[in-house]
Amino acid sequence: MTDIPAGWYNDPEDAAQLRYWDGLQWTDHRSPVPTHQNVASGESMAVVNGAFALLRDRWVSLLAIAGLGVAIAIAGVVIGVLGLSLSLEPGLFDIIETTTDANFNPDIDPVDEAFVDSITWEWNAGIVLVVAGWLLFLIGMYGGMAAGTLHLASARAGRPRNATACVAMMLRRAPRWVGIGLLWSLVSSLAVAAVVAVFVVGVMISPVILVILVPAALAGVIYGWPFMQLSGTGLLLAPRGTPPFRHVVSLVRANWGGIALRCLVVNLIAFAFNIAMNVVGLIPLVGLLISIPATFALYSYSIGANLLIYEYAGGSVDATIPDAVAA
């Protein structure tokens, strides 16, 4: 039995419980079989209601994760700006001060034109800071969403990990996620390039061909959207031995209509929420105070809704994501 990976399994001594297997033996950690309401199995709006319910129940931990992610992202921006300042000659702040002057016009002023021509890029240590800052910014923004997804998935299993544990798990798994994500990006870029090439050739042969190509491309985007929306959640949650995108493809193909409808409803609600945020944001001061918690709510709603759609589709969750000690 030593080949079975660590995780939660049905307790051989009590069918009503789960018990944690550490990879070698059963531990004393037990937990009731989760009986949470499968909010994603009903009508499409159940996903929306369930996502906001997750925000209501887990907002403290989600706020801690989001706060840490924003802090890391801000640190990345500061480091990146410092790197740019060291790499640009004259310095970044001098460039900003000069080019933002109301009288700056290089098209008619020789002095301003000479200043623009004098700007050079120095390949020095500042480049390292720029790259480091960029990476920190990505870790803060996307890592926060990944850690939030891990937290909500563990909470749905009845054994939530705290914010610190979720961030630590995110950092441990980040190299694998980044590697797979870069591979997906490469394949996606090649696919987009192929589509663009087909359009270019079609136009060169006859513009009439666009009558066929445009609807076909639109249909392809509509059909592929549910696969793309769940691919990120599948990458974060699927068991380590399961190819995440292949897993998502099999799930969506088995129930494309139900999943597509739920993705549509979730995205429409998010779109409407985002418009309302932009309108309220126009109000001086009050708009700023409201937009900050509203942005957090939208961020939490999005990851919660994608998790519930993934659950509705029957997606597998890695057994090590729920907290082994929470029981």
Image (cartoon, rainbow, N blue to C red):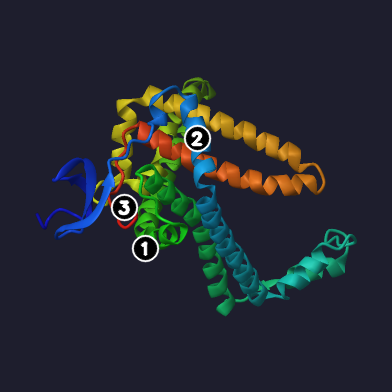
The outermost residue toward the left is: 1
Residue 129: which disc?
A: none
> Which is in the foreground here, disc 3 or disc 2?
3
Query: Which of 74/7 is in front?
Result: 7
Q: Residue at x 33, y 25 (%)?
A: 255
Q: Residue at label 2?
A: 200
**First along the sequence among labels 3 and 2:** 2
The kind of residue tagged 2 is: Val
Decide if residue 141 is in sight here.
no
Q: Which residue is mark 3?
A: 327
**Amino acid under disc 1:** Arg
Residue 257 located left or right of residue 30: right
Tag count: 3
Q: Quadrant of residue 198?
A: top left
Residue 243 vs residue 274, the one in the foreground: 274
Residue 280, x across and y down, in percent: 75, 39
- Residue 35 is left or right of residue 287, and the answer is left
Image position of 35 (left or right of 133) = left
Secondary structure of the residue carrying tag 1 is helix
Front position among marks 3 and 1: 3
Q: Locate residue 314: give its quadrant.
A: top left
**Residue farthest bottom in this picture:** 125
**Discs 2, 1 touching: Cβ within 8 Å:** no
Where does the image place residue 111, in percent across and percent down from the top left? Answer: 86, 70
Q: Position of residue 35 (x, y in %)?
A: 33, 36
Quadrant of the drawing holding the N terminus: bottom left
Q: Secondary structure at mark 2?
A: helix
Which residue bears the numbered disc 1? 172
